[in-house]
Amino acid sequence: MTALALALGVGGLLLGLLADRLAVRWPAHEPPFEAGRPPGWRTAVAIAFGAGSLGLLGQRFGLSLDLFVVGAYVCVLTVLMATDLDQRLLPDVLTLPLVVYATVIGVVGLNPYVDAGLRGMLGPLVMAIAVPIAVYLPSIPFGPGAIALGDVKLLVSMGLLLGFPRELLGLFGAGLVVVVVLGSLLALRRIGRRTYVPFGPFLILAAVWAILLPEGSGVL
C-alpha cells in the first residue's frame, strides 16, 4: 500500500466517522427515526466504507487529477452511506448535485471513464435514463418505497459518471453482495421476509466497485 493510499484511508476513516455523526442530526429526522443515537454498527460501516473506498482510490489513481475528480464523488457517497443507514434517506441536496457534477465533468473532459464533449456523453446519458427506469418500473407493483426516489437519482449520476458497461458491472457486483448479505441475515433470523431493507448502501457499494475497476482488468 502506498503512503498516499494510507493517508487517504485515514482521511476516509475520519470522514466516515463525521458522516455518521452528521447523519444522526441531519437531515431532520422524521418518525419512526429518532435523532441522537450513540455510535454503533452503522458508525462502523460508515468508517469502514470511508477508509476503504478512499484508500483504494489512492492506490488506484495515485496523485492525479483523476483522483481529485472521482474522489469528490466518493466523498459525497460516504455521507450518503451514513444518511441511508441512519434514516433510509438519500437527500436531494446531495444526490441532485451529483447529477450536475457528473454531467459537467463529462462535458468538459474531466471524467476518466467517458469521452469528452457532448458526443461522448451520449452513452452515459442513455445509461442515466435506461437503468433507473429499468430498476424503478418493476418496483411499482410492490407499492411506494420499494425503490426510493433517492436511489433513482443516485442511479442517474452513476450512469453519467460510469457509462457502459462499467455501471452494469458495478450493479452486478452489488447484486451478489445483496444476495450474500440478505441471505445471511435471513438465515441468522436478524431480518424477516417482510423487513424493509434500504438498497442505497448497496448502490453506493456498486458505484465504488465500478469506479475502482481498472481498464484491462478482463471485464472492461
Image: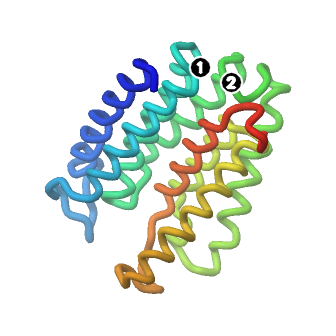
| Structural crowding at the residue carrying mark 2, measured as other residues with C-alpha within 10 Å and reported as few (<14), some (14–19) or many (≥20) | some
Q: Is residue 165 left or right of residue 132?
A: right
Q: Position of residue 35 (x, y in %)?
A: 18, 57
**SS type, badge 2:** loop
Q: With respect to residue 157, does 134 lie above or below?
A: below
Q: Nearer the viewer, residue 191 or 100?
A: 191
Q: Nearer the viewer, residue 56 or 157?
A: 56
Q: Nearer the viewer, residue 115 or 1?
A: 1
Q: Position of residue 1 (x, y in %)?
A: 45, 27
Outermost residue to the front: 1
- The numbered mark at residue 161 is none
Check disc 1 and report the residue beneath it. Answer: 66
Q: Residue at x 37, y 37 (%)?
A: 51
Give amino acid for label 2: Pro
Between the C-alphas of marks 2 and 1, the distance is: 6 Å
Upstream in sequence: badge 2 or badge 1: 1
Q: Residue at x 57, y 29 (%)?
A: 101
Outermost residue to the right: 119
Q: With respect to residue 163, does 69 lie above or below?
A: above
**SS type, badge 1:** helix
In the rendered image, which quarter contains the C terminus?
Answer: top right
Give amino acid for label 1: Asp
Verify CB contact (< 8 Å) between mark 2 and mark 1.
Answer: yes
- The numbered mark at residue 112 is 2
Q: Position of residue 72 (x, y in %)?
A: 48, 27
Q: Residue at x 49, y 33 (%)?
A: 56
Q: Residue at x 31, y 29 (%)?
A: 10
| Structural crowding at the residue carrying mark 1, measured as other residues with C-alpha within 10 Å and reported as few (<14), some (14–19) or many (≥20) | some
How many numbered circles does the render carry?
Answer: 2
Q: Position of residue 134 (x, y in %)?
A: 73, 62
